[in-house]
Image (cartoon, rainbow, N blue to C red):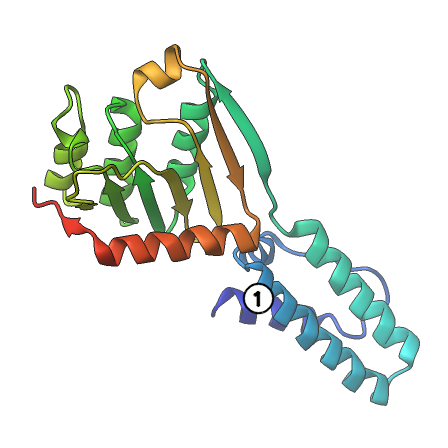
Amino acid sequence: MRPFEQVAAFMVEQQGASSAFSIPAEVIFALNHLNRAERGDLKAYLFNQAKKMSLNETAHDALFWFENCYLLIEKYTYRFHQVFFSPGNDIPETILGMIQNAEQTIDLCIFTISHYELAAELGKAHRRGVKVRLLTDDQKQFDKGSRIKTLSQEGIAVKTDDSRYHMHHKFGLIDRRTAFTGSFNWTYTATKHNQENLLVTTNYDIVNQYQSEFERLWESMQPLWG
């Protein structure tokens, strides 16, 4: 059952409840996987159910049920917006956490990668079945300590710009629900010495814009063969 269907079915089952109801963990988990558009569709569906309910029961009962559904959706919707800075470990630890929690997809557009722990975590994600795609600069694969070829050899899909100019982006997307971007390159220098920043957000519009740009770039760039 898809997350939308799972949440909708649970909510409808609560019609007629005489008191406020709580959501079990598996429904909260499903709710957290709905994007903003799906949550809007869910609210519209539940509103229509409340209108139908009001024909057979009192309007008060229908309103009570819909209000409880709405409040629970808002309460358990996952939202995250935060900025991190370096030098220090906040940025790499945040990225590591996002990679470790990825369930389906990791799409990265990163200028250079020589940070061993971050690269190793991508390999682990790939091996547990997460679809990992990496866009990077063609010239940076030759840097000392670069992990680009290693990641490609591990089976991760890697593409480069194949241009005399640079693919200079530093952004990523996790499960098409979370975007992160900033000045941070995946290097030890950026972690330990540079003044860098990383913005992480689940804002639906921003995530969609970054995802669209990633897909555009992915279609236009050349595969790096391991």
Compared to residue 52, the image places residue 68 above or below, namely: above
In the image, taking residue 147 as reference, residue 95 lies left or right, namely right
Q: Is residue 85 visible?
A: yes
Q: Label 1: how many residues lie within 10 Å, few (<14), some (14-19) or many (20+)?
A: some
User: Residue at the top extreme?
Assistant: 193
Q: Is residue 22 visible?
A: no
- 200 vs 161, nearest the viewer: 161
Task: Name the residue carrying label 1.
Answer: 38
- State the residue at coordinates (39%, 10%): 193
- 219 vs 3, nearest the viewer: 219
Q: Position of residue 149 (x, y in %)?
A: 12, 34
Question: Would you identify the image quadrant in which residue 31 lies?
Answer: bottom right
Compared to residue 28, the image places residue 169 above or below, namely: above
- 46 vs 9, nearest the viewer: 46
Q: Position of residue 3 (x, y in %)?
A: 52, 64
In the image, taking residue 36 as reference, residue 90 lies left or right, namely left
Q: How many marks?
A: 1
- 37 vs 30, nearest the viewer: 37
Q: Secondary structure at mark 1?
A: helix
User: Residue at the left extreme?
Assistant: 226
- State the residue at coordinates (17%, 42%): 163
Question: Would you identify the image quadrant in which residue 148 lies?
Answer: top left
- State the residue at coordinates (26%, 54%): 218
- State the residue at coordinates (49%, 51%): 207
Q: Position of residue 224 (x, y in %)?
A: 12, 45
Residue kind at label 1, given as amino acid type: Glu
Q: Position of residue 146 (x, y in %)?
A: 18, 26
Compared to residue 93, the image places residue 158 above or below, namely: below
In the image, taking residue 87 as reference, residue 8 lies left or right, namely right
User: Residue at the bottom extreme?
Assistant: 55
Q: Quadrant of the C terminus?
A: top left
